[in-house]
Amino acid sequence: RARDENRCPFYTGFKRGGSNKVNTSLLDIEEIVTACKEKMICPYFKCREDAKEAELLLIPYDYLINPTSRESMGVSLKDAILVFDEGHNIEKSCEQAASFELRSADIGGAITELDDAFDILESEGPICEEALGDMTTDQLMAHINLLKKNLCNLEDSLLAVKLSRDPTTERTMSKAPGSHILEIFGRSGRLGDGICAKDAQRINLIVRKAITVLTYSQDSTSSGGLNLDKLQSLVAVMFTPQPAE
């Protein structure tokens, strides 16, 4: 929020072209932070900018393999040569990048955060409109109600999954191919349709708007959208579009 409202002096210094005053070549992390702070420049965005022109990048597995993390850093694999050190860890990193954990409490928390955002829009609508961009308060409230129905259907769909005792692990569970999760999410329920690939962009937009409302509000009791943020990451993993590169 401080960045979006130009209240962060380090980000403002970076956007005003101050990054040209700092040379990060051959500096380690601590040295980069110190040099950027002296010039009132954000070291995070400075490193992101320099990475675009760098010939050699040293990146942890998770940042490179996970498409969401890679895109957030602006790292492209096009025409790149990848060298993996400690290659025996690649399989585990790939599994983690394509996996997620979703609890009933996460869904319930996301629904509560949507309720909080809705209440804030009702009481502070004119104040929040500045943060909503091209979407009106009424439009966002309607979308929030629709997403709540999607999540309630998802909760019912998960509860309907039949569990059985697994003799190998001695745990009560349901085993199925990975693609079965798409069926669980896409299952229609008493409140309407499920969540499918076509809904990913809409959910991403509404979650971002709802989190903006929660962080924009003066209500200190708000969670800030932690559960919604987890939902957004989960949807990104499930419905990752085919890369263009």
Image (cartoon, rainbow, N blue to C red):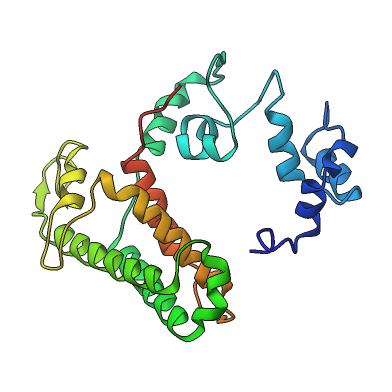
Q: Residue at x 90, y 47 (%)?
A: 39
- Observer-nearest of 26 and 202: 202
Picture layout, residue 96 above or below residue 111: above
Q: Quadrant of residue 197?
A: top left
- Observer-nearest of 189 and 128: 128
Q: Is residue 76 visible?
A: yes
- Observer-nearest of 69 and 97: 69
Q: Is residue 42 visible?
A: no
User: In the rendering, at what x and y percent does residue 229 appear?
Assistant: 45, 58
Q: Quadrant of residue 17?
A: top right
User: In the rendering, at what x and y percent does residue 127 appear?
Assistant: 57, 79
Residue most extreme to the bottom? 123
User: In the rendering, at what x and y percent does residue 169 appear?
Assistant: 19, 43
User: In the rendering, at what x and y percent does residue 187 appear?
Assistant: 13, 53
Query: Would you say 196 lies left or right of 225 here?
Result: left
Query: Would you say 210 lies left or right of 184 here?
Result: right
Q: Residue at x 49, y 65 (%)?
A: 211
- Observer-nearest of 186 and 15: 15
Query: Would you say 102 lies left or right of 7 here?
Result: left
Q: Residue at x 34, y 68 (%)?
A: 144
